[in-house]
Amino acid sequence: MINDNSAYLRERLNGFEPDTAIVLGSGLGKFTDLIQDPIIISYADIPNAPTPGVSGHKGSIYAGMIGKHKVICLAGRTHLYEGLNPQYIAMSTQELQELGVRRFIATNAAGSLRTEMPAGSLMMISDHINFSARNPLVGLGKVPHFADMSAAYSPELRKKIKEIAERENIKLFEGVYIMALGPNYETPAEVRLFRNFGADAVGMSTVPEVITAVNLGMEVLGFSVISNLGAGLKDEVLSHEEVLEVVSEASGKLILLLKKFLEEV
Ligand code: HPA
């Protein structure tokens, strides 16, 4: 299965060997505008790839140069709440590695657990809590187990990102992301629990990809665009449409930050 997909992608990429993978979360699809003349591969054409079923996700791969990097953007991800086997995520990250990827950047939309980090904020992930009760490495016989997660989100790259954000006047929060399985949003009691755990933002993605990327020895960065305050922190009803709208408005900051990063680092 891995070989099928890798072979298909290699053929479509036609000699282009990406070094950086960027997974684009809900509402972040316009990041792909940074790539001039991208090679575009629809997930539907990849032999063994499930297609993302959530609106706000494009469901295609865009490959091309951004700055000094050969980038492969996954515009649209599948989520565990779609019923996907977590091992699939491990395998697709491994396919990226087989194509040449050494650096993995995950982005997502998330709810804030801190009132001082309101909707529209940008948070760089410093660490995560896997509260999904799923792990993509379970049952993968061949991969090494017991990956060290003590510096999952590269301290060196985070330092560079902070320098760029300061220089470009981009307000950047840094904090802990907690993954809930979803697909429902949290209850106010869960939001209080997650805050007490020490988390700063909650979402339904990113953690499985990051676990597999770290396990494969990749350098990892993660970013959350805050689309709303967590349930109960404000008197509002959460909706996916609202999430997409806020993220799309706030995504410019993240796109600028990543553009500069790919040009410089
Ligand atoms: N909770 C979980 N996932 C999310 C949220 C949230 O409040 N907002 C966007 N994705």
Image (tube, rainbow, N blue to C red):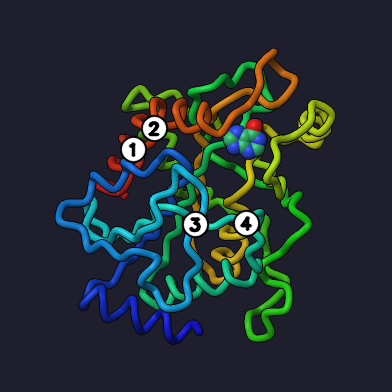
Who is closer to the viewer here, 42 or 148? Answer: 42
Q: Amino acid at mark 3?
A: Pro
Q: Farthest residue toward the top?
A: 235
Residue at 63 percent across and 26 percent down: it is: 238
Is 39 positioned to the left or the right of 225 in the image? left
Instruction: Determine whether the residue tagged by mark 1 lies in a helix, strand or loop.
Output: helix
Q: Are marks 4 and 3 in contact (CB under 8 Å)?
A: yes
Q: Is ligand 1 closer than 8 angstroms to the Cβ of mark 4?
A: no
Q: Earlier in the sequence, mark 4 or mark 3?
A: 3
Residue 16 in view in this figure: yes
Q: Which of labels 3 and 2 is toward the front? A: 3
Q: Amino acid at mark 1?
A: Ile
Instruction: Determine whether the residue tagged by mark 2 lies in a helix, strand or loop.
Output: helix
Q: Ligand 1 appears in which quadrant?
A: top right
Residue occupied by mark 4: 82
Which mark is drawn over residue 52?
3
Crowding at mark 1 (Cα within 10 Å: few <14, some 14-19, many 20+): some
Residue occupied by mark 2: 251
Who is closer to the viewer here, 1 or 23? Answer: 1
Q: Earlier in the sequence, mark 3 or mark 2?
A: 3
Q: Position of residue 11 (x, y in %)?
A: 27, 81
State how far apart marks 4 and 3 are (Cα): 8 Å
Q: Position of residue 222 (x, y in %)?
A: 51, 46
Q: Is residue 150 above or below residue 224?
A: below
Is 257 positioned to the left or the right of 12 in the image? right
Crowding at mark 3 (Cα within 10 Å: few <14, some 14-19, many 20+): some
